Image (spheres, rainbow, N blue to C red):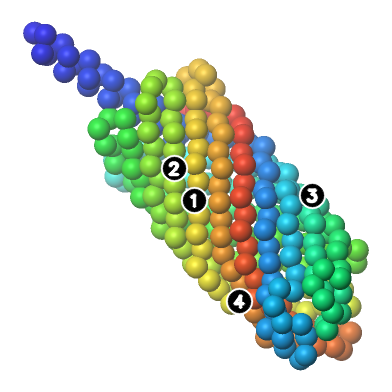
Amino acid sequence: MAVFAVAAALCTTAFAGTDDIKASNNQLEVQAISTKVDYKETNDGRLGSRAGKFYTETGNVPGFALSFSMMNDVLLDNDYLQFQYSKNDGHIRSKGVLRPGGSFGSAVGQPGETISDYSLRWGKGFAVDGAFMITPYGELGHHERQSSYGVTSTTYTHSWYGAGALVQYSPISRLVFGANALVGRTFAADVDLSGPRGFSGSLGDSNLYKAGLSTDYAFTKNFHGNVGVDYTSFKYGDSATHRTSNGGLSWMPDSQTNDTTLKIGVGYAF
């Protein structure tokens, strides 16, 4: 009887952990976010221009994020679906080259920065030892970033696909830790420049990497609080040389983007 009682207690704890994880995966969340942008262009020296580091944008841009997720037995056990949308809007610090033959840093400014992302994930969760859930998933998303200064603006867009995994752990009742990682690929990358030197063209695609950590706590059955951090890294290949609006020639150099986003918010579990 004693052995049976201990076994029953362990099973109860295990099921409680799994239930807490599933509860955290059935939520509508609203979050305040801040994204640290680290963007760098590297020029190839085309048409006598300066080769090497050509232009950078760095700084923190505030915003908000919305997320809807659910984990239910629809097609398979523990089917997982998540839709995310985020938007950042603010200003950022820029540094670049004033003239084609000039030195890096001869031009500085604070352009307006707007970033929008939305993505859809689908996967299946696997319970491990009652307190863990591992959810492999596929993801499809779209990214847009606009940098504007005066009458000119530059808009970068791309979509992406990838595969990743979400690992969640519930050490005690109501508390769930999460970690996720994804490896993907960008596609349909484009740039659109407005103003006197404006042109539109395609950019080279690249691998994309995402990673994140999160914590979810259920204050009540329905009211949750959460904090987290996400990291995203990708590149744009350089564009072809285009004729601009004022009759000149221009292009977009190779670039590297590394974004780190801090999140804090509340959720309604259903």
Instruction: Label 4: state its secondary structure.
Output: loop
Marks 2 and 4, Cα distance to the nearest angstrom?
30 Å
Structural crowding at the residue carrying mark 4, measured as other residues with C-alpha within 10 Å and reported as few (<14), some (14–19) or many (≥20): some
Instruction: Label 3: state its secondary structure.
Output: strand
Contact check, label 2 and label 1, Cβ < 8 Å: yes
Instruction: Label 1: state its secondary structure.
Output: strand
Q: In the visual, does 251 lie left or right of 160? A: right
Q: Quadrant of residue 201?
A: bottom right
Q: Amino acid at mark 1?
A: Ala
Contact check, label 1 and label 4, Cβ < 8 Å: no
Mark 1, residue position: 211
Q: Position of residue 159 (x, y in %)?
A: 57, 64
Q: Amino acid at mark 4?
A: Gly
Residue 195: in sight, yes or no?
yes
Residue at 16% in and 11% down: 5
Mark 2, residue position: 179
